[in-house]
Structures are given as C-alpha cells and as structure tokens.
Image: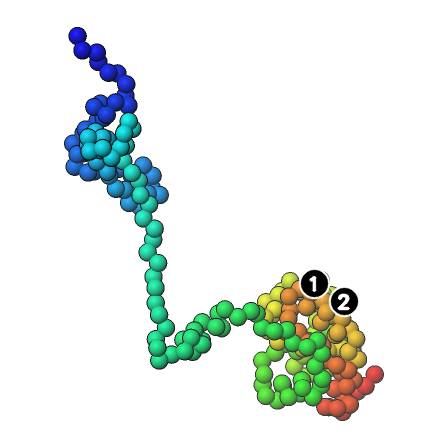
Amino acid sequence: MPRQDNNPSSPNLAPKSDARRQGKSRPRSGLILAVSTIPFASDIVETGLVSNRIVRRQLVLTPFPVPSFSVPPQLGKESFFAPLLPAMTTPTTPLPYEIDVQAVKELLDSEHSFVFVDCREPDEYEFCRIEGTRLLPIKQVGEWLPAFEAHKGEHIVIHCHAGRRSLRLTEMLRQHGFNQVQSMKGGINAWSNEIDPRIPIY
C-alpha cells in the first residue's frame, strides 16, 4: 500500500485554490501598496527554479513616485528659486540695542509703525511726556508683560529719564524674544535738549 506523505512541506500538497491559480491575493496589511503573486511551488519545482521549498507568494512594496523637475534653461537657479527665499530665511536680524533721539524723530515724522514706550513711573509721566508714548513702568513689568507679548514681532522703542532704565528693560525684553526692541539713548532729557525744548528737564 503506498505510503501517504503527511509532510506539509511536500510540493505535491501545496494548496491550489482558484484564487491563487488566477493570480489573486489579498494584502495582509494596510501598509502594503502593491502585491504581486508568483507561480505555485509545485509549478516552480517542476521547472527546476526552486528546490525543496514552498514559495507561496511575494509581497512587493512599491515606493511612492518621486516627482522631478528641471529649471527652465532661460532662468538661472538663483532667479528660479528667488520666490522661495523669503520663506526659507531666518527671522529678522535683531536691531541695535540703542537708537538716538534724532532717529526716533525721523520714525515719527515718516509715520513708521512702531510701539513707543515710556518705562518711567506714573508721577514722572504726569510731569512731562512725549506725545504718543505708552506708559509701561519697568517696576510693573511682571504685570503688563503677558499682554505685551502680542507686540513681540513689532518694532518697539523704549525711553525713560536718562536712558538707563530703558536700556535695562530692553535687555529684559530681548531675553523674552523681543528682537526688535530698542532703548532711546539719553531718555526724555535728550529729547528735550535736541528735539522739543518745551519738555522740562528734571
């Protein structure tokens, strides 16, 4: 009586479903982009391509196509990529820590958009002030700084009495990411001497 071979690795026992004969298979994972089926093991063994091994199917991952383009010959690479440069550049270069009163006067006359801050105390502000300034006392910086974060990307000029407090506040704000903040050199006294003598010196 012939002996039955119960070895599941036998080529003659390889399953031959209709789906496999028609070259159909189902991917096992959602990560498989494409599946290709090779002939049954028995067919391969008969042709001598594979020996003593069942090859059921081969999963092939097809990579995403990589688009390619070329720079038009009439344009140089610099001019072709020029529109992309603003988005690729680093943030605006920080301004110098100090600005003189003449430069601040020019900003005002040219209607340049900036935040003009007076960091003195309220009683000093009541005694004399530069028109258009906003009172933000340096001693209360912990109270007004959170709301002032909205101006982080704007040009800010700070002044005090003689320029020392405004420079100290400028350094503090720079540490918090205010790269466009400057201290007005000489303070309101320099403004009175060089720009508006109507403002009293104290």
On screen, residue 60 above or below 145: above
Q: Nearer the viewer, residue 10 or 164?
A: 10
Q: Quadrant of the N terminus?
A: top left
Neighbor class of circle 1 (other Cα within 10 Å; few <14, some 14-19, many 20+) is: few
**Residue 122: in sight, yes or no?**
no
Secondary structure of the residue carrying tag 2 is helix
The three-letter amino acid code for the residue at tag 1 is Glu
**Residue linked to disc 2:** 139
Question: Residue 115 location in percent, x, y?
Answer: 63, 76
Which quadrant of the figure has residue 15? top left
Q: How far is mark 2 from mark 1, CA to CA?
A: 9 Å
Nearest the eye: 66 or 135 = 66
Q: Residue at x 58, y 80 (%)?
A: 113
Mark 1 sits on what residue? 143
Residue drawn at x 77%, y 86% is 190
Q: Position of residue 28 (x, y in %)?
A: 31, 36
Q: Say which residue appears at 71% left-offset and 71% top-offset.
A: 170
- Residue 22 horizontal side relative to residue 112, left or right: left
Q: Position of residue 52 (x, y in %)?
A: 28, 27
Image coordinates of residue 45 in percent, x first then y, are 22, 30
Q: Is 8 located above or below residue 177 in the figure?
A: above
Residue type at tag 2: Lys
Q: Is residue 106 left or right of residue 43?
A: right
Which quadrant of the structure image shows residue 12? top left
Number of labels in the image equals 2
Tell me: 108 left or right of 46.
Answer: right
